Amino acid sequence: MPLQVPGAVTVSPREANCMIEQMGLGLAVVVAMRTQDKIPGTLVELPQVAGESEEINQAYAKAFQRFTGGEKDMPMLFYCHHERCQLSVLAIKRAMDAGYHKLYWLRAGNSGWVNAGLPLERELVAKASAAKKQDAVQSALMEVRTCGVEVTDQDFVNIALKSPTDNALVSNLRLEAEKDRATRVNCLTRTRDAVAKIDAKNPALAEIDTLISRAPDEIDRAYKAARARVEASPSTHFKAPLDKIPLASLKTALEEARTYRSARQTCGTFDRPMPSNQAQWNAAKSGLDEYHTCLARLESRAESAVMEAAMEMASLRRSDSDFSAGEAVALVTGSARYRCSIRSASGCLPDASWDRVAAVATPSDIAAFEKSNSDRGNQSSDIKRLRAEANDWVDRFNAQQEASRSSSSGYYSAPSSPPQPLRRANNTFAPGMK
């Protein structure tokens, strides 16, 4: 093999690497053989064809045209297997014949490239793929940090406030802990699945499995620790909120709760004997119209019932206090177990703070308050139920009226052909008889 090819510049692997890095896509790197071991930046793989036929020369000319765009001044770097490979020399000569003149020859070939300690293209691709995989794994592992479930003192306080008895407290703690355990385990499992999808053998999978197995105990310990901290000094968490409750506003809210009437209490029920004469028919029709008007009046406020209930019941919001009546009731019931008269330990809740509110929010007041809240929450469904009962009465009346028309005896003296009663869809009220 010659050391030089006339019309081309011989370059070493280091020089070729420098050209590739500096010139980028401005340099056409051409491998004159079929191989998997390409040097980085190789743009084209020429057909490995020996011979001097016109057909072969035209095939090479088309190949040069394709990857240079016909730019005769485009620099081209040729190489093949090793320094004894003649394919690159042949390719250079054909490039010259096609009119290209900025030609470079990597005489050492890709074997010389490797011997110079330079990476092949497939190695760089593999390395980039590995780096990309690692980045994806790290990104997935970052999700582990978001899977933590923090249990604060306030979390326990909130559970205590909705647990009037010790048994209720134990039950509610268990339910909350179960939800938090499920949240953490599900989050960690999603992360594990994401990592396994990228790299099924990643050692981080075992670490995540360990976190999943430990999650239940960790959550239980967190709740026990929060409970221990709060119960060591309940006065810190309950005294100030109790002392801020405005008693006058609380008393007003509780009195309003006692006077609240449910839909059934307000409108009653429409269940009366079937009319047997004109006077009874007229009275039934009038009563049904009034009944539907009452239900419609209640229903017109259904969409704003929750807001109205909050404004009426949580009358403490009219003052500077941050508490609603519902929060005040929960506070007095949930903090009762921590009074100093029950727990004579340091940090217990002073009885005076609790008694101040409990004197207004008596057990009977609290029961009435809770019932009124329940009735308000169920008002829409109660209205639908009452309307359905009234509509059933209308159906029975319609059936009786139809039967009487076909009967020769006739058992009441209503008009001979009164209009047929109407019913509307269940989401609107039925006007009843007409």
Image (cartoon, helix red, strand yellow):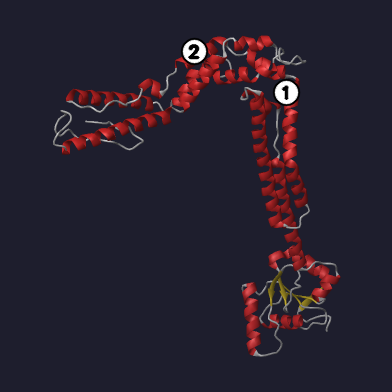
Residue 199: x and y in percent read 73, 57
Tell me the SS state at disc 1. helix
The quadrant where residue 330 appears: top right
The quadrant where residue 228 appears: top right
Residue 201: x and y in percent read 76, 57
Q: Which residue is mark 1?
A: 230
Residue at coordinates 76% horizontally, 61% vertically from top-left?
127
Q: Which residue is mark 2?
A: 255
Q: Quadrant of the N terminus?
A: bottom right
Residue at coordinates 24% horizontally, 26% vertically from top-left?
285
Could you tell me the amino acid type at mark 1? Val
Q: Residues within 10 Å of mark 1 (few under 14, many from 20)?
A: many
Relative side of 306 to 69, left or right: left
The quadrant where residue 4 appears: bottom right
Mark 2 vs mark 1, CA separation in Å: 33 Å
Front residue of 32 and 163: 163
Could you tell me the amino acid type at mark 2? Glu
| Residue 218, above or below 42 | above
Front residue of 318 and 372: 372
Front residue of 143 and 218: 218
